[in-house]
Image (cartoon, grey):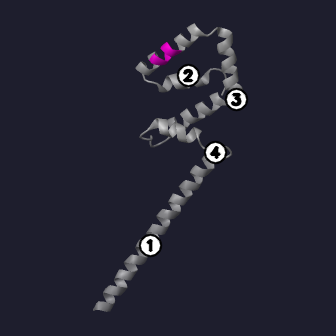
């Protein structure tokens, strides 16, 4: 993520009242801190990967097909994931396991149907 993409993504995701509040907070911070200090802090966040991490989390939330009931919990959970965990690989594994589960459920349903047929034939 380059430049000021994260603030744009964040601003885009906020409602107009939230944007106004965020703008007021940014303006208050601007009033309190000199430009050089702000720029140094922004560079620090960029160097340390905070901007990239926040952007990835927000984009992930945006791309989530079923939005979580609590977006803040989603962000906390995603940011709090242990380092070295490949979230995309885990999602792919989860999808494969869901398919396998559906397949096994279909086989179980078929076996139960055959069992009922056999038991019904014995009772005659």
Residue that carries the numbered disc 3 in the rendered image: 48
Locate residue 43, reporting x and y percent: 70, 21
Magenta stretch holds residue 103 = no
Judging by the rendered image, the residue that carries numbered circle 1 is 108
Q: Residue at x 54, y 14 (%)?
A: 26
Please identify, in this view, whether the residue under mark 1 or under mark 3 is nearer the observer.
3
Question: x, y percentage for residue 114?
Answer: 39, 80
Q: Earlier in the sequence, mark 1 or mark 3?
A: 3
Residue 64 visible within the image: yes
Give the mark, 2 or 4, whose residue is nearer the N terminus. 2
Q: Contact (CB < 8 A) between labels 1 and 3?
A: no
Q: Residue furthest left?
A: 124
Q: Give the extent of the magenta segment.
A: 21-25
Q: Are marks 2 and 4 in contact (CB under 8 Å)?
A: no
- Separation of residues labelled 2 and 4 (CA atoms): 27 Å
Circle 2 residue: 8
Labels 3 and 2: the sequence-earlier one:
2
Q: Estimate the spatial distance between the alpha carbons at disc 1 and disc 2, rounded to whole Å.
A: 50 Å
């Amino acid at each position: 993520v380059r430049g000021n993409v994260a603030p744009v993504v964040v601003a885009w995701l906020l409602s107009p009242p939230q944007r106004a509040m965020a703008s007021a907070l940014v303006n208050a911070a601007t009033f309190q801190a000199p430009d050089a200090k702000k720029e140094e802090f922004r560079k620090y966040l960029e160097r340390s990967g905070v901007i990239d991490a926040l952007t990835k989390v927000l984009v992930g939330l945006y791309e989530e097909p079923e939005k979580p009931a609590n977006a803040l919990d989603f962000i906390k959970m995603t940011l709090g994931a242990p380092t070295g965990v490949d979230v995309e690989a885990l999602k792919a594994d989860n999808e494969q396991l869901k398919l396998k589960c559906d397949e096994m459920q279909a086989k179980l349903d078929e076996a139960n149907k055959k069992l009922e047929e056999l038991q019904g034939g014995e009772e005659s």
